Image (cartoon, rainbow, N blue to C red):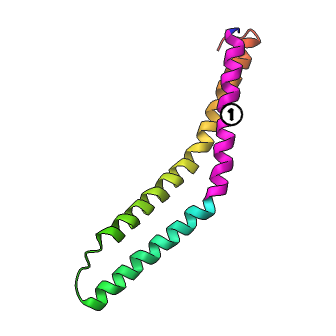
């Protein structure tokens, strides 16, 4: 297989992976949003319970779940923001390869 064909195959693989990732992010969005809402409800519930009891609550397990859900929400958001940049990078690589194939040096 020529280097040119290998490059095309690799770009096709990258493009396919990004498209599948984009599709799966769309499917996952509702669940992630709901997790954020439930984490907020947990946080509010713990704060209200602590206020009723007039002391700081030591709900380590619940705090861990809230922290993990928050981290997941941030990671999901970062992934959503980075995806268009990655797609643009693949398109730029594809354009460079097309220019090289046409005999133009990039």
**Residue under the image location 69 percent in, 35 percent down:** 16
The residue tagged 1 is 15
**Residue under the image location 57 percent in, 65 percent down:** 33
- Magenta stretch holds residue 14: yes
Percent position of residue 8, x then y? 71, 20
Percent position of residue 57, x then y? 26, 79
Is 53 situated left or right of 106 in this image? left
Which image quadrant is residue 102 in? top right
Is 96 drawn above or below residue 85 in the view shown? above
Q: Nearer the viewer, residue 77 or 27?
A: 27
**Residue under the image location 53 percent in, 53 percent down:** 76
Is 65 situated left or right of 75 in this image? left
Percent position of residue 105, x then y? 67, 11
Is 62 situated left or right of 57 in this image? right
- Magenta stretch holds residue 79: no
First to last magenta residue range: 3-28
**Residue that sits furthest to the left in the current view:** 55
Q: Main secondary structure of the magenta part?
A: helix
Q: Quadrant of the N terminus?
A: top right
**Residue under the image location 66 percent in, 56 percent down:** 27
Crowd rating for badge 1 (residues with CA inside 10 Å; few <14, some 14–19, many 20+): some
């Amino acid at each position: 297989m020529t280097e040119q064909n290998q490059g095309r195959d690799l770009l096709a693989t990258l493009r396919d992976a990004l498209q599948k990732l984009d599709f799966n992010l769309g499917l996952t969005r509702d669940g992630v949003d709901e997790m954020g809402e439930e984490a907020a409800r947990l946080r509010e519930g713990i704060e209200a319970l602590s206020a009723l009891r007039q002391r700081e609550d030591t709900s380590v397990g619940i705090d861990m779940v809230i922290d993990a859900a928050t981290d997941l929400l941030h990671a999901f958001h970062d992934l959503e923001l980075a995806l268009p940049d990655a797609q643009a990078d693949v398109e730029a690589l594809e354009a460079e390869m097309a220019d090289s194939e046409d005999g133009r040096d990039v």
